[in-house]
Image (spheres, grey):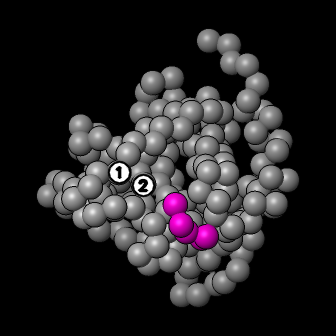
Amino acid sequence: MTDREVKPPVTLSGYQVTLRDVARDDLEMIRNWRNDPETRQHMLSQETISPEQQSAWFDRLQSDPCQRQWLILYRDKPIGVASIKSVDEGVPLDAASRVEPGLYIADLAYRGNILAFAPTLLMNDYCFGQLGASELQATVKEDNEAALRYNRKLGYREVEHQSGLVRIALGPEDYEVSSAPIKAFLSRPVRR
């Protein structure tokens, strides 16, 4: 993919949610979510994002084969953002053996709810099943106990503690075993 090529869209659906590529029309909503102090406090970079920074980020994203950003939809309503990126600098996602997923649920009605696992399950299934990743990795702030607990339920293990950060990792086998009960629950028929 050249610098000017736009990535083909990827939409994922399952476990009661849909992940669709972030669109330019989503930027201000996402920027407001990301700048919310309650969300920002858990980010590795806690700076307030300007409209210009958000637009520049989106422009870079369009042709970057090493990452993907999705809007999370539940019943067609945006509730958060999910992302994946190659851990190895410059290695495109479709060739990466290690991938870093990211997620935040902006809608308070779904934060801390079992539904918050749905986008992660979709991303993990995609990373292991379609991209062929051998490991997922993430870095979490040491004081973000909710995120650490969430990831432990999915099978992540802590591999390193350094400077207030915890690096965690997940392999496909641990993921399959740990996620099976959550997948079963979220895959059941939904009454509307």
Q: Position of residue 52 (x, y in %)?
A: 14, 58
Magenta-tinted stretch: 94-98
Residue type beneath disc 1: Lys
Q: Position of residue 64 (x, y in %)?
A: 34, 62
Side (left or right) of 148 relative to 69: right
Residue 7, labelled with which disc?
Answer: 1
Q: Position of residue 95 (x, y in %)?
A: 53, 66
- Say which residue appears at 68% left-offset and 13% top-offset: 191
Residue 143, labelled with which disc?
Answer: none
- Say which residue appears at 78% left-offset and 49% top-offset: 179
Q: Tell me whether the residue at label 1 lies in contact with that at label 2, contact meaning CB atoms closer than 8 angstroms.
A: yes
Residue 118 occupies which quadrant of the picture? top right
Q: Is residue 67 visible?
A: yes
What residue sits right under mark 2 in the picture? Answer: 68
Side (left or right) of 94 relative to 70: right
Residue 20 occupies which quadrant of the picture? top left
Placement of 97 over or under 84, stated as above or below = below
Q: CA distance from mark 1 to mark 2?
A: 9 Å
Q: Position of residue 33 (x, y in %)?
A: 35, 47
- Say which residue appears at 74% left-offset and 65% top-offset: 171
